[in-house]
């Protein structure tokens, strides 16, 4: 298709043994096994990372920023996702984790929960100002945006045009830091720390702006060890954090790591929070059929329980969720954002998309409509001949996908081991 | 050759099968996406097919959907065995419904969805025989623009 759609996810040919776990777990049927190795079809991949979860050989890798890439920046800023606060034991305060990040090598750490609250307030204002159309869909999960662009193009106009917290935070830093530090923007690296394989794609090819304000994304998996080490080394930091809690946290914003976190702050609107990629697909199908029109904001997170269930997190999501819920209850509904500040930024369009989300067409069965119809008919005919066992032995995720690959001329019917037997 | 460029498929819908609600219309919708039809057309078909499917599930015993796609148009015939509609003119009236406000907000009972189907179709016909069933014929042009 168009420009080369390099996905974040790729297969390590050394580790891949060509089994069918990723094949059947992929919600968009974007994987095929060819010559004994898994291959990801870039046009279909939405970077959800389900395959990472299901691969028993750890063969699916996400392209994220590595530590060595950081050395190219003179000044390094980390913006950790609030999920990070749930990755360490219950006695480790968020401020200690942020301190540890500085020890790991960042010059500055920017706390995101306040910006989550800012984003939330902006969405609330947008809902108040625009009564139609409904339901609006939050843009925070980049996989949901990619899914809508590819599978639900008619829903692109429903995406609430407010940038997600990570981009707003980076924009704030980009606006202030070069001036304060007297450095050129290229010298400043703004790095998101994330449990999500899709953030890198949203940075390299953003859907709503020409260029992301972020320079890269490091996975929690990669940075967990160094943070843990830094936490162990620095007793004084811990004491400082306990005595001088210099960093501001938003009780409201902390919860956005969890499913329902974005809708929690919207007290005067009807909201629905969905998590998990299959349930997200099911609900988006309903929206496309004209349902959920009475809902103001639909929050979809493709990871189970929200970002806390991201495939590049370390701690199991139940523990992480419990810790974040504890922090949320400690902070209560503490808000830190000044409504007047938010209004100012909102009216300056500082928080909104540069341009709307545009559909990204997936390739039809054939560019010519009459031929596409013929191919659909042939596909259904072939599908009837197949055993409907969906075993994956042919290299396609199920019999229907094989039939489709055959009419697209990317596979042969003889790839099916059951067909071969009957017809030696 | 002209005959060749058409696609036909039948689907069955069971009355009262709320767990399967939306399955048939979703399958039709996904098929249209594979054919490269515009998202406007896909959305109109999705809405019309969903409403028609829900009518069968909510009010009839069983129904059959006959889908025909040609390069020019999509035709969906939904024929059900059920109680039928006593006064079709009344049921076609926008907003006419025996359902409560609450049900309408859930997306159900907005005048049995018939006005909504008509709104999204380029041609819409309905015949109902009380005590026997209802037959809908929905046509949407593949190059059609959204009405209104």
Image (tube, coloured by chain):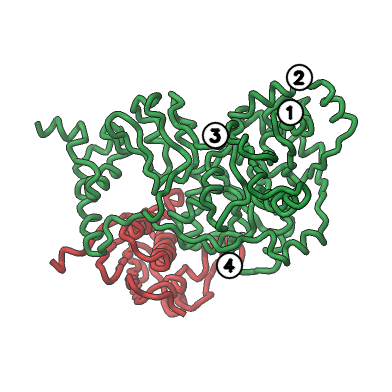
Chain colours: A green, B red
Residue sitting at 59 percent across and 52 percent down?
A: A212
Q: Earlier in the sequence, mark 3 or mark 1?
A: 1
Please give the chain letter of the residue carrying mark 1.
A
Residue B17 in the image: state x and y as whole percent.
42, 51
Q: In this figure, which residue is indicated by the disc labeled 1?
A: A103
Q: Which of marks 2 and 1 is nearer the N terminus?
A: 1
Please give the chain letter of the residue carrying mark 3.
A
Q: What element carries label 1?
A: helix
Q: Nearer the viewer, residue A215 or A155?
A: A215
Q: Earlier in the sequence, mark 4 or mark 2?
A: 4
Q: Which of marks 2 and 3 is nearer the N terminus?
A: 2
In the rendered structure, find residue A233 and report the number of the disc placed on it: 2
Q: Earlier in the sequence, mark 4 or mark 1?
A: 1
Residue A67 in the image: state x and y as whole percent.
60, 31
The CA distance from mark 4 to mark 2 is 53 Å
The CA distance from mark 4 to mark 3 is 33 Å
Q: What element carries label 3?
A: loop
Q: Are marks 4 and 3 on the same chain?
A: yes
Q: In this figure, which residue is indicated by the disc labeled 3?
A: A311
């Amino acid at each position: 298709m168009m420009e080369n759609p390099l996905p974040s996810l790729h297969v390590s040919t050394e580790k891949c043994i060509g089994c069918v776990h990723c094949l059947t777990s992929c919600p968009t049927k974007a994987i095929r096994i060819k010559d004994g190795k898994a291959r990801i079809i870039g046009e279909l991949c939405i970077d959800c990372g389900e395959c990472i979860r299901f691969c028993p050989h750890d063969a699916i890798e996400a392209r994220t920023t590595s530590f060595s890439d950081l050395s190219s920046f003179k000044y390094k800023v980390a913006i950790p996702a609030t999920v990070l606060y749930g990755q360490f034991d219950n006695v480790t305060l968020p401020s200690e984790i942020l301190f540890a990040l500085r020890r790991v090598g960042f010059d500055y750490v920017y706390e995101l929960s306040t910006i989550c609250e800012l984003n939330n307030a902006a969405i609330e204002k947008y809902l108040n100002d625009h009564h139609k159309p409904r339901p609006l869909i939050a843009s925070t999960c980049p996989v949901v945006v990619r899914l809508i662009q590819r599978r639900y193009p008619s829903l692109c106009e429903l995406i609430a045009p407010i940038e997600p917290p990570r981009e707003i935070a980076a924009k704030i830093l980009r606006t202030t830091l070069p001036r304060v530090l007297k450095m050129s923007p290229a010298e400043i690296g703004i790095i998101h720390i994330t449990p999500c394989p899709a953030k890198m794609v949203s940075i390299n090819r953003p859907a709503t702006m020409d260029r992301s304000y972020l320079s890269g994304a490091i996975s929690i998996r990669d940075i967990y060890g160094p943070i843990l080490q830094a936490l162990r080394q620095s007793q004084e930091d811990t004491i400082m954090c306990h005595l001088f809690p210099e960093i501001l946290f938003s009780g409201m914003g902390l919860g956005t790591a969890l499913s329902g976190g974005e809708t929690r702050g919207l007290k005067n609107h009807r909201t629905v929070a969905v998590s998990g990629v299959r349930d997200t697909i099911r609900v988006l199908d309903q929206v496309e059929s004209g349902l959920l029109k009475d809902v103001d904001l639909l929050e979809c997170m493709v990871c189970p329980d929200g970002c806390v269930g991201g495939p590049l997190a370390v701690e199991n999501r139940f523990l992480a969720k419990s810790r974040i819920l504890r922090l949320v209850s400690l902070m209560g509904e503490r808000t830190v954002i000044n409504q007047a500040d938010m209004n100012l930024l909102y009216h300056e369009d500082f928080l909104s998309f540069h341009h709307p989300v545009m559909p990204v067409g997936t390739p039809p069965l054939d560019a010519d409509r009459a031929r596409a119809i013929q191919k659909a008919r042939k596909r259904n005919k072939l599908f009837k001949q197949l055993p409907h066992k969906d075993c994956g032995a042919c290299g396609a995720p199920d019999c229907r996908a094989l039939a489709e690959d055959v009419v697209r001329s990317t596979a042969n019917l003889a790839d099916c081991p059951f067909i071969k037997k009957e017809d030696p | 050759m002209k005959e060749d460029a058409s696609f036909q498929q039948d689907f069955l819908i069971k009355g009262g099968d709320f767990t399967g609600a939306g399955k048939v219309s979703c399958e039709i919708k996904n098929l249209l996406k594979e054919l490269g039809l515009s998202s406007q057309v896909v959305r109109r078909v999705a809405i019309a097919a969903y409403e028609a499917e829900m009518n069968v599930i909510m009010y009839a015993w069983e129904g059959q959907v006959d889908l025909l796609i040609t390069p020019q148009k999509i035709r969906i015939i939904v024929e059900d065995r059920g109680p039928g509609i006593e006064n079709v003119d009344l049921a076609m009236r926008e907003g006419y419904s025996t359902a409560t406000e609450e049900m309408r907000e859930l997306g159900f009972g907005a005048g049995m969805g018939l006005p909504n189907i008509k709104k999204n179709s380029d041609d819409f016909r309905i015949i109902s025989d009380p005590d026997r069933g209802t037959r809908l014929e929905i046509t949407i042009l593949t190059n059609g623009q959204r009405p209104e």
